[in-house]
Image: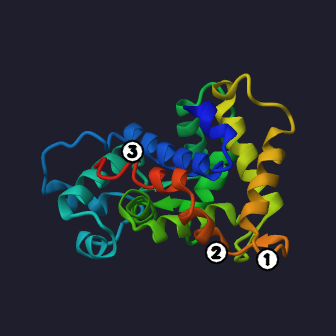
Amino acid sequence: MLNVLWETEGLQAVGIVVLVCASLKLLHLLGLINFSEDSVEDELELSAVRHRPEGLEQLEALTRFNRKELQILYRGFKNECPSGVVNEDTFKVIYSQFFPQGDASMYAHFLFNAFDTDKDGSVSFEDFVMGLSILLRGSVQEKLNWAFNLYDINKDGYITKEEMLDIMKAIYDMMGKCTYPLLKDDTPRQHVEIFFQKMDKNKDGVVTIDEFIDCCQNDENIMRSMQLFENVI
């Protein structure tokens, strides 16, 4: 299946699928995929960590998770991250375990920056569940907005060809041997050239969020990938 994805012009679907897969691995490693019984102690323990998250009622209003789901998510997050926050090194360790055949450090860096919405160098429980809510239960528009933010590395509101190339190189590096023998040194650039021409409709050298969303919504591979991991928790 990977072979087909690497060869299609819908290459962007790979990035989105990898994005969601990597997020699911984070859930698995934090012990969040397997539900356990509800516990009222979780809310009482919120004050025991250095970073105290917002109240469950507020997070329930801001996300698509219910109270029980938020308690379960917090329990796993707290067990693995007693300080209440995750730093970039933790992200890199998690994705190196998920992709041992490649180098996931750069992709983890980009993904961490996408989750770190307030740019304070750490991902809090609120940051985590807000991003996860979009990735797993958001509308197509919300998911594509989130993906655009990932590709827009310098956060200037545009995706350049070099930014897209940086992300795709990071994905190729992370997949490592999974792509063998398809990859050559210039393969990421060739694929980005094809995709960028398709997406940059006015040929001004940058991709706006409107161009990005319009192109993705008209790509069957991406639309299918948007629904692959719904309702996993």
The coloring applied to the image is rainbow
Q: Quickly name the residue at label 1.
A: 202
Mark 2 burial class by Cα count in 10 Å: few <14, some 14-19, many 20+: some
Residue 119 visible in the picture: no
Q: Quickly name the residue at label 2.
A: 209
Query: Which residue is located at x 39 percent, y 66 percent?
Result: 138
Residue 168 lies, in percent from the top left, at: 72, 48
Residue 147 is left or right of residue 199, and the answer is left
Residue 222 lies, in percent from the top left, at: 53, 54
Residue 184 is left or right of residue 102, and the answer is right
Q: CA distance from mark 3 to mark 1?
A: 40 Å
In the picture shown, does residue 148 fall above or below 12?
below
Mark 1 burial class by Cα count in 10 Å: few <14, some 14-19, many 20+: few
Residue 30 is left or right of residue 171, and the answer is left
Q: Mark 1 or mark 2: which comes first in sequence?
A: 1
Query: Which residue is located at x 51 percent, y 59 percent?
Result: 123
**Near-viewer residue (68 or 41):** 68
Residue 89 lies, in percent from the top left, at: 61, 45
Q: At label 3, which amino acid type do we have?
A: Leu
Q: At label 1, which amino acid type do we have?
A: Asn
Q: Quickly name the residue at label 3.
A: 27
**Near-viewer residue (133 or 115):** 133
Residue 59 lies, in percent from the top left, at: 31, 71
Q: At label 2, which amino acid type do we have?
A: Ile
Residue 55 is left or right of residue 113, and the answer is left
In the picture shown, does residue 172 fall above or below 228?
above
